Amino acid sequence: RTATAQKDKSWKAAGIDVQAMITMVSAYDPYVGMQLRMVAAFGMRREEAVMFRPWLSDEGTSIRVRDGTKGGRERSVAIIHPYQREELDAIKASVKKTAHIGNPDLTLKQALRRFSYVMERFGVTGKQLGVTGHGLRHEFLNDLYEQIAGIPSPVRDEKKTTAPEEGWASAEQIDFARATVSEAAGHSRLSITNAYIGSTRESKKAGQNWTVRTPDEAEKWKRLAQLS
C-alpha cells in the first residue's frame, strides 16, 4: 500500500453523473442524499456529513466543520462557488436550526451504517462502480487544487506535463494549493495531500513563473488566501 494516490478516485473519473446519482439517492433516502450533497460541496468525511448542523455551521463566507472530525480538529471550508451556497441554503431549509442532517430516528452508528448500505444499494462500491462515497471527497479536493494551481492535480495528469499555455504554475502557487487542500481536508500535514491528489514533486520541479489565468480565478485565489 502507498500513501500516494495512484489514480483519480473521484466519481467523475469513474464516469458517474454526480448530480444524477445524488438525485436518485435523495429520492430513496433524503438524509443520505443531503449527506452526499455536503460531501460533494465541501469535501466532508462520511461522519462529518452525518453529524453536520447546517444552521450552526454557516459562517457566511465559509462553513465550520465541528462534529465528527478526525482527532476533533475543527476547520473552516471556504464558500467560493455559488453552488456551495445554494446547496447549503437548500439543506438549511430542510432542517431545524439546531438539527444535524442525519436521520433523527437513528443513532450515529446506525446512521453511518445506513450511509454505507445506501451506497452499496446504488452500486457505489469499489467492486461495483469502482468508487465509494469517499470518492466525492477526493473529487472536491482535486477540483480545489486545480482551481488554485491552475493545472490538473498530479493524479489527473498522467504525463505530468499538462499546463496552461502561459507556462507552469509556480512552485509557490503549487505549495499554496497543496496547503489549501490540506486545510480543507482537515489535515495539518502537507504530505497528506498526496493521498488525494498524488505527488506534486515532478510538477514542482517544472515550476517557472506563472499567475492565475483569469481575474475571476485570481479573486477566488485571494479569497482563499485570506481565509487560510
Image (tube, grey):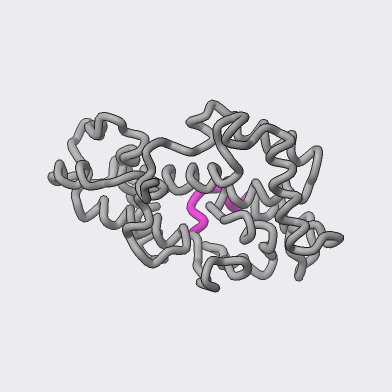
- Give yes or no for residue 25 being in the magenta stretch: no
State the image coordinates of residue 34 (x, y, percent, origin top left).
Answer: 71, 49
**Hey, which quadrant is residue 23 in on the image?**
top right
- In the rendered image, the residue lying farthest to the top is 15
Looking at the image, which is closer to me, 116 or 228? 116
- In the rendered image, the residue lying farthest to the front is 1
What's the residue at 36%, 35% (across, down)?
A: 156
The answer to whether 68 appears left or right of 74 in the picture is right
The answer to whether 81 appears left or right of 114 in the picture is left
Looking at the image, which is closer to me, 114 or 208? 114
What's the residue at 41%, 47% (across, down)?
A: 196
Q: Quadrant of the C terminus?
A: bottom left
Looking at the image, which is closer to me, 73 or 6? 6
- Give yes or no for residue 84 being in the magenta stretch: yes
In this orientation, does residue 150 appear? yes
Q: Which residues are magenta?
A: 78-86
The answer to whether 71 appears left or right of 30 in the picture is left
State the image coordinates of residue 7 (x, y, percent, origin top left).
Answer: 40, 36
